[in-house]
Image (cartoon, rainbow, N blue to C red):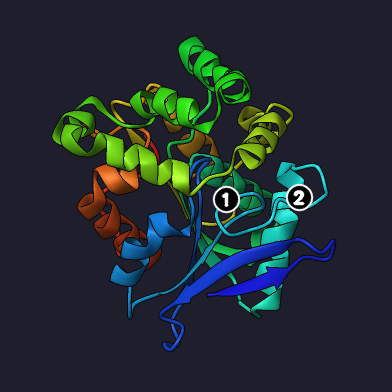
Amino acid sequence: MAYFRTQDGCSLYYETIGFEFARPVVIFLNGTLQTTMYWKVIAASLKPEFRSLLYDARGQGESELGELPLSLDLHMEDLSALIRHLELGPVCLVGLSHGALLAYAMARRRPKMVSRLVMCSIGVRAPVRARLIVRSWLKIIESGGIEVLVSAVMPHVFSESYLVRNRKILDRIAKTIIRRNRAPSLVAHLSAMAGYPSLRSMLKRLDVPSLVMCGSDDPLVSVTGAAVVAEESGGRHLVVNGAGHSIPVEASELFLKTISQFLSGRWTDMPEAI
């Protein structure tokens, strides 16, 4: 557990796992309501094949929000600075949702820093329902607070099957998410996202191997929209049947097996894109 201070003085929290081994580095990038805690079991399971770096972006978890307005460019600069600070070579990036967008932006604009790329729950051609859902989150937290936001978000970020399997502990899951987040930071994050460039405008063939994973029961990302990202990036596309937006926890064994094989160059059972 450590902290890195950015050029503008913002303190960012990070953890390293498996750095006692001389292995490739995987950096995990959080989604909107996530912290480093989300990835710990997965990162530990990648030892000793990979070293893992977990970090909270500005406003997430143990990191400060800072004084600068949040933007995708600022998140890229923070990540690049952290990579340089730790003297890491080209790294593998694994991102979920907002983290996947950050990973894509890094691979597109700073390709020399990236060796391989896994993006979960990201796509173009977002359904109208999905756009309305995400747009409502800012209004919900501003009017009702973080507890109301988490209650509203959960049916949209987990699949029906996951909610059914875990119905007895949903309140505990919600309380954990609430405890790990801060309302002012979420307001800043959601407000900033409204000004991000569209993923469609960023799409191009990438110079690094990439994999796009999506859930078949994700109301926020369509299968066809995820397939477009994979195809136009020159990467691969995997649909996780029955999963929602939170693939790493909903299909943890499949997710771990897939990223382990793909990041090590051993994943050959899927064609390039779909």
**Is the residue 169 above or below the residue 154 in the image?**
below
142 or 98: nearer the eye?
Answer: 142
Mark 2 closeness class: few <14, some 14–19, many ≥20 residues within 10 Å:
some
- The answer to whether 4 appears left or right of 20 in the picture is right
Residue extending furthest toward the top: 128
The x, y position of residue 147, in whole percent, is 47, 31
User: Residue 191, which numbered label?
Assistant: none
Q: Place residue 2 in its image quadrant.
A: bottom right
Q: Is residue 190 above or below residue 109?
A: above
Quadrant housing the C terminus: top left
Residue 33 rendering spot, x and y as whole percentages:
49, 41
Please tell me which residue is depicted at 53% across the width and 40% down the height of the picture: 32
- Relative to 170, 39 lies left or right: right
Q: Secondary structure at mark 1?
A: helix
Say left or right for 16 vs 187: left
Circle 1 residues within 10 Å: few <14, some 14–19, many ≥20: many
Residue appearing at x 43%, y 36% in the figure: 121
Give the mark nearer the N terminus: 2 vs 1.
Answer: 2
Up the image or down, 142 lies above or below 66; here it is: above
Say which of marks 2 and 1 sits in front.
2
Judged left or right of residue 139, residue 191 is right
Q: Which residue is mark 1?
A: 103
Image quarter of residue 142 = top right
Q: Secondary structure at mark 2?
A: helix
